[in-house]
Amino acid sequence: MFKQQTYKERRAELRRRMGGGLILLPGNDEAPANYFDNAYAFRQDSTFLYFFGQNLPGLFGVIDADSGEETLYGDDFTVDDIIWMGPQPSVAELGAQVGVSDTRPSAALEQTVRKAVRQGRPVHFLLPYRGLTQIRLARLLGVDVAALADRMSVDLIINVAAMREVKSAEEIEEMERAFDIGYRMHTTAMKMCRPGVTEREIAGAIEGVTKQYGWGVSFHSIVSQHGETLHNHCHDGVLESGRMLLCDAGGETVNNYCSDHTRTYPVGGRFSQRQKDVYEVVLAAHDHVAAMVAPGMMYRDVHTASYRVLAEGLVSLGLLRGNADDAVAAGAVSLFMPHGLGHGLGMDVHDCEAMGERGLRNFDIVAERAAEIDTCILRNNWRLRPGTVMTDEPGLYFIPAYAAKWRSEGKCRDFIDYDLLETYFDFGGVRIEDDILITGEGRRMLGGGRHIPVTVAEIEEFMGR
Ligand code: GLY
Ligand code: MN
Ligand code: MN
């Protein structure tokens, strides 16, 4: 938890930005995995955590942007609970830690919300991504769950995203701690990457690292020799020499700030010439982005710049014919990299995505405003600001089914050498990912000057030790 003042200032800033209305910020509850007392690891809602700082289930924050009242709702534990859980702070104590003097039992929440609804006041909420929170909000507002999506507050989405996407100095320190966890994860994986070792052993080891040094993983680890499958969560493979392992994984600090890195390296630690050739193209795109992103730039332009470097490399490999600019304009690169260059990073590994175009079921309600204000919730219209953290994660993937589809449709056939491409169908895929902070002057890679081995020489040297 940050100091009390941080949360007070954030709530005051949100009140100022919103100008009025009742703002509902539900925390998460326990989510049972297979029976009520056996829950998934508790993960607090990031927006609740951002404004109310408490990392415990059963809490609900309310900010009255007209009166300035701030209230934390929750129920004190009984002695029966404490027998199982040990001594627990009261809700009043939790509130005091984050500068909220008004705390009330959960049952009082209904009256507060119903009164505002009766009075016709605006009641602001973000569309919840968890079913339990949806049911709770619908009940409080007296509407059907399906109606929530039409009533979510565009103002709240815009203002919360605009605040969360720009990281303060103390948040950057947390993200540097997240980098440290990522560094340990990826160097552990590299050291283990030998023929005969299973993907599961490596995934288990690096996920253990996240629990040793932080809260846990920031998303399901991708540890696979089938790097061509973008989000491959299967860990059944046994490492074979001649293949490459793609490891895309990150951890969260105990305060839930995330890291997200990818490295791809040869099993056993020595690149073949073909592996090196493909790898160097991806690294060139990664390095180009890391040298050129700057405040004020639009994310889509950075994405296109990475495609441009990949296109040049694909031309040099003979997989694309002709001119790199024409190939980019024709859309040929998306066969080899069918994803965006990166995304925002913060308290969510895809920061603020629950509020964005990929999180909301009906983003249309938000789209017009989002396009005006250039936030990360609409990636194509995202202006990079000092304090923004974004991932830089270009890749090249050889996906047989996707290539066969393009070929059968005759897509970009003037640009793509499909016969040569078929000789790469046993290759897999390469992705390289680092986390970049946009600064006032330009940018810097998170890691405080350290980085996870990334060049061919660094990887071969590190894995050969
Ligand atoms: N969560 C995987 C990635 O975006 O890199
Ligand atoms: Mn990643
Ligand atoms: Mn990523």
Image: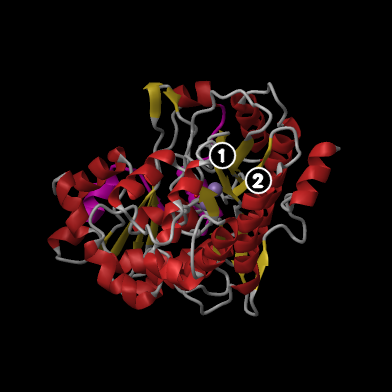
Dot 1 falls on a residue whose secondary structure is loop
**Residue depicted at 24% across the width and 59% down the height:** 152
Query: Measured from the top left, where is residue 1 in percent x and y?
Result: 59, 52
71 shown above or below 134: below
User: Could you say where residue 140 lies in the image, as x and y percent from the top left?
Assistant: 21, 48
The residue segment tinted magenta is 86-113
The answer to which image quadrant residue 247 occupies is top right
Q: Which residue is mark 2?
A: 274
The local secondary structure at tag 2 comes to helix
* Residue 19 appears left or right of 258: left
Q: Badges 2 and 1: C-beta atoms under 8 Å apart?
A: yes
Q: Is residue 283 left or right of residue 85?
A: right
Name which residue lies at 63% across and 23% down: 198
Residue 171 visible in rendering:
no
Task: Locate residue 395 relative to residue 273 in the image: left or right.
Answer: left
User: Does the magenta-highlighted stretch encompass residue 308?
Assistant: no
**Is residue 31 depicted above or below 154 in this figure?**
above
User: 228 and 247: which one is in front?
Assistant: 228
Quadrant where the image shows the C terminus: top right
Residue 415 seen from this side: yes
Q: Tell me, yes or no, whether the highlighted magenta stretch contains residue 105.
A: yes
| Residue indicated by mark 1 | 427
